[in-house]
Image (spheres, rainbow, N blue to C red):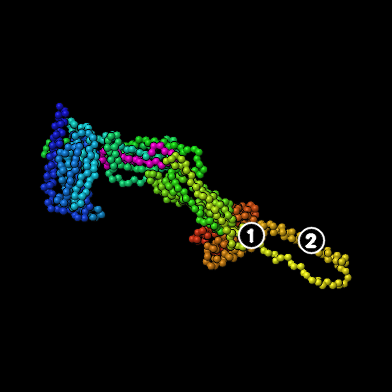
Amino acid sequence: MGRNRKFRVFRRMSAGLALRVFLLGLLQVSLSPSAVKAQSGGKVEFEAHAPLRAAVGESFQIQFTVGIQGATEIDPNSVEFAAPQLSGVNVIAGPVPSYGMFSSTQNGVMQNRATITYTYLVQAPAAGSVRIPAAEVRVAGKSYRSKPLTVECENGSGGLRGSGGPGTTRRAAPTGSDRSGREATVAGDDILLRMEVNKSEVYRGEPVVATLRLYTQVPVAGIEQAKYPALNGFWAQELDVPADDGGSRAAIGGKVYRSHTIRQWLLYPQRSGTIEIEQAQFGVMAQIVTEQPETGTVYDLWYGGANQVKNVPVKLRSPVVKVRVKELPQPQPEGFTGAVGRFELTGGISGDRFSANSAGAITVRLSGTGNFPLIEAPGLELPVAFEQFDRKTNERLTNTPQGTSGEKTFEYPFIARAEGEYTLPGLRFAYFDPSSGEYRTLTVPDFPVEVLRDDSEGGTSGLGMVAGVTKEDLRLLDSDIRFIRMGDPGLVRRGGVFLWSWGWFLTLFLLSAAFVGLLLYLQKSIRARADVSRVRTRKASRVALRRLKRAKTFMNAGKEGAFFEELLRALWGYMGDKLSIEVAGLTKERVFGELTEGRGIEPEEAREFLGLLGDCEFAQYSPAAGIDPAEAYRRAAEQIDRFESKL
């Protein structure tokens, strides 16, 4: 009895809906203009709409809409609609054309859009997926095709009824005599919140992409009270998510949903073991479309009762997601600092020949894809004859679902201090490749360099360093052994015999004393010349004054770069000579210690001298530092004069 009653109700509803569609189409055709034309320059759009789900035996609408931007009317004769072949459904009515015009104002500009919609009323006879093929339409001589659609047909009399619009769904009222007392509800699986990861098992440092998605079978008016997971145990970087264009179709548990991406993160695990991604909590407002009960009047036959949209709050929680993080294999190679991914390493040096006290740099470029934000720079140790400065790092990185891609550039600046031939060590960089599960080591070869002597000062090299003696520095003392004089010497006896006389003894004594004195003087002179430190100490002030004089020449000529370079040579050279410090150990810390602890200089005076050195170095490598050359020259002269009196 109940089944027959439901069948009669269904037949009455189907017939009424079919008659409604037919009368509506007839009225619209009769009222449509007979000679209206679309604007020639408008953009034409052709779209297809159908519900995501439909119940077996219930009717639903399939609509094909032609829209022209900027048009107020469409000439029906200018539109040729090629109806698709609908299989898997029973066509109750259609295609029925209907016309519409929409206007909107934005920034004071009126925008119009004219449409013509071809509506089918169909019915699914059996459960399964029904494919709606693409339709074709010709407008003003040009063809347009719609996208094919899929409708999931399910069993059950309490299923869904399509409203005909894109993505809109309404739930049928429960059967019974008191239909006016029904309430709009949302089933537990109508809206789902899921946190999805592209990998559930990774190595420590290997990127994981986590995506928070919302799956809907009913319209959602908005999201409120959103609480995102803390992502503890990961280094997280949020990725850009493209604007939602209505969502894509996805199947979960045999049901079709519209998938909307809420947020997406790029995660790098920081520890091994199982890391949990906590729940995300959302509050959403679902829109449920219901029908008022039919009274059997002519109004119900035409309009089918008025629809009502109700907002239903829904609380959502995403399940906890677990990611298993594996520890990196042991043993780890030399030079490995935690880099995971795929990389390439290149390097170079600014030159292979340098003058003493000139600057250079080694540049290393690391490129590829991996955990770039967590990568440390390769270490570099230069010989003691090179003064090494702080490393500079530049990076160009982009976060993508595949990982962080781009490059990092490391620059190692230095100053060559002592002349000679050196081999600067290359660099090693080890990383772990998760695709192969192996470590790989990249190397930059050694850099052979030659440091030439600093010819700016004849007998010294660098900042007060005594140069090595070369063949060119030797001076020929005499030309050769003198030639023996030939012939008669012309000897003539004069007076008495000088031998054994008092004059002879006096002369012998004087010559012996002179010989002893000369011998002692020569020994003392040899010892003094052998003491290089003492020689440098005595000549320190003279060399410094010559350099100050040369620096003043550069200052008067307006050559600030050359002035500060020569002033640095004067200051460093004076202190190196005065304190007998070799260039390899000539550092600010060493000078400060020698002055305060070894020579009894007040720390304030020592710091003032080192501050002058720092200002000159800063002005040499940063011309825009704003340091007055005249003031620097005055301070340097005062400092040298002061230390000369105290040292």
Q: Could you say which quadrant of the image residue 200 lies in?
A: top left
In the rendered structure, which disc, 1 or 2, sits on the residue that comes first in sequence?
A: 1
Query: Does 163 sit left or right of 453 as displayed?
Result: left
Q: Say whether residue 476 is magenta.
A: no
Query: Does 596 sit left or right of 29 as displayed?
Result: right
* Residue 29, image x, y percentages: 12, 47
Query: On the image, numbered disc 2 is attached to which residue?
Result: 516
Q: Please, is residue 296 above or below residue 587 in the view? A: above
The answer to whether residue 314 is seen in the rendering is no
Q: Please, is residue 358 above or below residue 271 in the view? A: below
Q: Residues within 10 Å of mark 2 (few under 14, many from 20)?
A: few
The structure residue drawn at horizontal position 47% and vertical position 38%, both measured from the top left corner, is 329
* Residue 218, image x, y percentages: 25, 39
Q: Give the main secondary structure, helix, strand or loop, of the magenta stretch.
A: strand
Nearest the eye: 560 or 333? 333
Q: Could you say which quadrant of the image residue 473 lies in?
A: bottom right
Q: Which residues are magenta?
A: 199-228
Mark 1–mark 2 Cα distance, whole angstroms, equals 34 Å
Nearest the eye: 443 or 162? 443
Mark 1 against mark 2, which lies toward the viewer?
Answer: 1
Quarter of the picture containing the C terminus is: bottom right
* Residue 524, image x, y percentages: 73, 59
Q: Please, is residue 599 above or below residue 228 in the view? A: below
Mark number, residue 470 = 1
